[in-house]
Image (tube, helix red, strand yellow):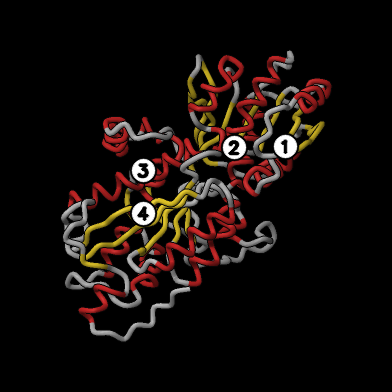
Amino acid sequence: MVILTSVLTTGALTLTACGSRDKDNKSGDSGNVTVTIGVDAPLTGQNSATGLGIQYGAQIAVDDANKNKTVPGVTFKIKALDDKAIPATGQQNASQFVAEKDVLGVVGPLNSGVATQMQQTLASANLVEISPSNTAPELTQGKNWQTKKVRPFKSYFRTATTDALQGAFAADYAYNGLKKKKAFVVDDKQTYGAGLSKIFKEQFAKQGGKVIGTDHVNTGDRDFSTLVTKIKNSGADILYYGGQYDESQVLTKQLKDAGAKIPLFGGDGMFTPTYIKTAGKAAEGDLVTSIGVPVDTLPAAKDFVNTYKAKKYPGDYGTYGSYAYDATTAIIKAVGAVVKDGKLPSDARQQVVDGVQKSSFDGISGKISFDEFGDTTNKQLTVYQVTNGEWKSVKSGVANPK
């Protein structure tokens, strides 16, 4: 654990406490002080399509800041670490970011389960963390968030809204939009999937629907024959799945192949072209909820989308790329507020945390600001449905849980 207690001279602090001079830095030439922004996400294996979208969304933000000299005297660079969607690996990555004094902020992780293992480590070093995708309510509002909200870590923020809203939004659309009355609910037993399914079940029942069956899968499963038979025989008219695209894209294909012609409805962890590509025609009619509105429809995100495509970056920018861009920009702006005469103070990390809390700017995904829990004030959500082999938005709005 690195504790910044240096009492060196101001000039030396510029070199040692939080920034370094690097004349050979290749990220840009906007200044002599180099500040690193860490990115933690699954860059290989499970969930890597969306993880890579986060990495390169952050990279474009840094490139733009360097090109535009957003913070005079400071050059930003990205250090991306692969957590492989494994909580323990995310915690190791957090320790690595803490130990590297140039790191003044972290963007990520993708998975809420990984975040639970990173928060304490980063908070202990006053190192700000902004996730573009974590949706588990307890990350910002505590384990008892449904009865008494208490913020666990003041260094943790997110530009994604929570499952409390997302699950309710899906339940409302399933019951009132699709007119579905009987749901079978499955989750992958992970923090994100189990939490999302729990909220969907509660809200679907409150709407007047009936949950006629529940089950669980393991991450990495590929044979769902027993589960498919159970769902088919249940008489459900919709399957709600809490988890990522890796398993659901296989489950929906096996479900349709078995003759169960019901839609699979999931959360933003499924919202990727990879889901449709893998499931093929079986994905037609399936649905997801995702944060915000379609990035391709946002005028402010036009340059971002064009840049991502022009550079042929891997991964899916449409899911969390713009939210990673805005999370990175929030850190960059906070760094800009603490730089004095081209120098960084010894408590730069703590000041960046405070600066992020005060964030208020127009991002490419919408207005960026945070409430007292570190949650985004942007509560917009969208339901997408697979239509002719593509995700098409069918409803946008703000969820209002009963």
CA neighbours of label 3 inside 10 A, class few (<14), some (14 to 19), many (20+): many
Query: Is 25 positioned to the left or the right of 314 in the image?
Result: left
- Distance from label 4 to label 3 (Cα)? 13 Å
Q: Are marks 3 and 1 in contact (CB under 8 Å)?
A: no
Image: 75 above or below 45? below
Residue that numbered label 4 is attached to: 79
Q: Quadrant of the C terminus?
A: top right
Q: Name the front one of labels 4 and 3.
A: 4
Q: Position of residue 327 (x, y in %)?
A: 39, 52
Instruction: Give whichever of discs 3 and 1 has the lower sequence position.
Output: 3
Q: Is residue 377 shown to the viewer in this render? A: no
- The residue at the point 51 percent across, 21 percent down is 277
Image: 395 above or below 376? above
**For this rendering, which residue is in front, 152 or 74?**
74
Residue that numbered label 1 is attached to: 217
- The residue at the point 51 percent across, 34 percent down is 382
- Distance from label 3 to label 1 (Cα)? 31 Å
Q: Position of residue 318 (x, y in %)?
A: 42, 34
**Labels in figure, total:** 4
Instruction: Give whichever of discs 2 and 4 has the lower sequence position.
Output: 4
| Residue 57 numbered tag | 3
| Residue 198 numbered tag | none
Q: Amino acid at mark 2?
A: Gln
- The residue at the point 83 percent across, 24 percent down is 234
Q: Amino acid at mark 4?
A: Lys
Q: Secondary structure at mark 4?
A: strand
- Distance from label 4 to label 1 (Cα)? 34 Å
Q: Amino acid at mark 1?
A: Val
